[in-house]
Structures are given as structure tokens and as C-alpha cells.
Amino acid sequence: MTPRTTTTRTSSGAARLAAATGLALVLAACGGADDGTDATSVAPTGTAAGASPEATVEAADFPVTVTSGQAPDTTELTIEAEPVSIVSISPTATEMLFAVGAGDQVVAVDAFSYFPEEAPVTDLSGFEPNLEAILGYGPDLVVASGDPGDLVSGLDAAGVPTLLLPSALDLDEAYDQIERVGLATGHATDAAELTEQMAADIDAAVASVDLAEPLTYYHELDPSFYTASGDTFIGEVYSLFGLENIADATGEAYPQLSQEFVVEADPDVIFVTSGDFSDSPEDIAARPGWDQVDAVEGEDVVVVDADEASRWGPRVVDFVESVAEALPAVQD
């Protein structure tokens, strides 16, 4: 099998599918992009929009206009001056901000933004944001993954711009969001270099694996059998290796399966996320009837980091590399 690479980077316009109730754990770990760019945006290829391919992306002069939200629900956000007091209530956005070099501009992050270690963690919530508490940090830019409780309108009334970065559906959207974060914070060049390096690292990891035949898999989000299908960001990563998701037959992004469904599907490999709310490979092997599942019988139950697997920021490279490292052993 020839692994699919990710070097070609054109922004996806696919809308994010609605999350099922089983996404609670994923959202806790996490906390879309669209295909719109304008004359001041950074093009997905790492060159300034409208510039020649040889042009180098320079840090944008403010004001800048950046796309906020995810197609088809987007707005053009104008940021008048380089932000010096940023509040992030999205763990993925926090990782993006620090990765592009805007960490010194971040004054507060939400309770789940515990990476990187130097992030200024507070008790702010991205699920039930407290407008007064956010404004208490004096932000000149707020970055969030969604707009619960009319957050954006409240911040707008206070004169604070909000950059919305919903959960990306694929790698192209993730790259695009990182570059929008770079543009919005005055680090366009750093962001473009980061996404190019991410794409190269992911290409190398995928190319290192040569499966003799396609493998089927089941990605377990929690012991109640909620899973991520191939029509998700998580599934996009596995598809790079040609893996086939047993949950795709449901037609849902995050379906809740049954034990019987998984056992009958007999996946070649099971990916289970790390964390207090996940079963261990030993727990999975001990489930009634699961000892006959190929993945269990062959000891091909692979633990992946919950945050790396659910966040669509720079650490997706670590997720891809962990999958690449595990797959050769599955074939043995």
C-alpha cells in the first residue's frame, strides 16, 4: 500500500458534524476552519495571499483581517493592533498560540489548557464562559472554539474581538487555523513555518509505514463504546495510513456502539485513549467475548494520548507518529 501524504495543503470547506453526547470526554480534552482567505490572510501554502510562490510571509502589519469561525458560518474579524493581552478558552488554541510564538502575549487560559506547562492556567471555562471573568483579565483578543452563551456578542459589546476556531475536520483545516492564529497575533511567518514542518513530519511518519494490506480499527473514546468514525479529525489521521474504521457503517461521526457490534466487526487493531475514564488494554481483554477479537488476541490494543488524539493543534504530529510506531507490530 502506498501511504497517502499530506504535502498538498488546500483548505477544506467541510462543515463540522454535530457532536453526540459521547463527545464530552473529547471536548474536555480539546476544550473548524473554513476556506476563506482575503488579501491580508496567510495562504494555506505558506505564502502571502496574492503573492508569488517565492514570496516569504512576513509578520503582518496591523490592522489585519482574519476569518473567524467555520464554513458556512464565518465572519471576517478585523484586529486593529497586535494583541498584547490574549485570553484563550480553548486548549487547542492555547497550544497553537504558544507554538507560533505568541505565548508571551497570553495572559490567561482555561482550566483544561494545561499544555504547554508555562500556560497561565485559570478556572475559566470554555463550555460555560463567564464574560465578566474573562474581561477581568483585560484582553484585547479572546480565542475560543465556540460561542456558548452569546460569548462573542458580549465581548463585541465590550470592544474585544473574538477569534473562533471550531474543531477541525481534517489536517488542512488544522493548518489553516494555525496560520490564522499566527496572522491574528503578529506571528504569520512563524505559523507558516510551523505548518510546513508539521506537514513534512507527518508525511515522513506516514511514509515510514508500509502495510501489506488495509487494517480495520476501532477507536474507543470511553468504556461505554462511544467512538470516532472515519468522518472526524481523529479518523482523518488513521485514514492517512489506509486504516478502515468499523464505525463508518453507522453513518455517524461519533456513534455509540455496542459490545456485540465491536466483537462482530472483529477489528485488527483497537486504539484506546489514555486517562482516568478509559479502560486499559488489560480491562478490554477481560471483557466477555472480547478474547476472540483479532486485536485482543494479537495483543494489538494500542494506547494513544487522549489530548494528542483529540486536539487538532501542533501535537497532532505526535499522534500521527505514535500510530506509525504502533502499526508495524500489528502486522507481525
Image: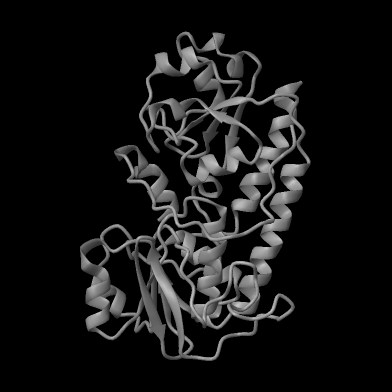
Drawn side of residue 218 relative to residue 243, left or right:
left
State the image coordinates of residue 322 (x, y, percent, origin top left): 67, 41
Check the image and tell me how it is coloured.
one colour
- Image point (50%, 52%), residue name: 311
Instruction: Return the residue nearer the eye: 75 or 158.
Output: 75
Residue 111 quadrant: bottom left
Seen in the picture, residue 164 relative to 76 is either above or below; the reply is above
State the image coordinates of residue 197 (x, y, percent, origin top left): 71, 62
Residue 303 quadrant: top right
- Image point (62%, 59%), residue name: 9
Drawn side of residue 47 relative to residue 66, left or right:
right
State the image coordinates of residue 52 (x, y, percent, origin top left): 69, 79
**One can see residue 58 in this view:** yes
Image quarter in which the N terminus is found: top right
**One can see residue 110 in this view:** no
Drawn side of residue 268 relative to residue 250, left or right:
right
Seen in the picture, residue 50 relative to 110 is either above or below; the reply is below
State the image coordinates of residue 310 (x, y, percent, origin top left): 49, 47
Residue 160 quadrant: bottom left
Image quarter in which the C terminus is found: top right
Q: What is the count of numbered marks?
A: 0
- Image point (25%, 84%), residue name: 158
Instruction: Return the residue nearer the eye: 312 or 127.
Output: 312
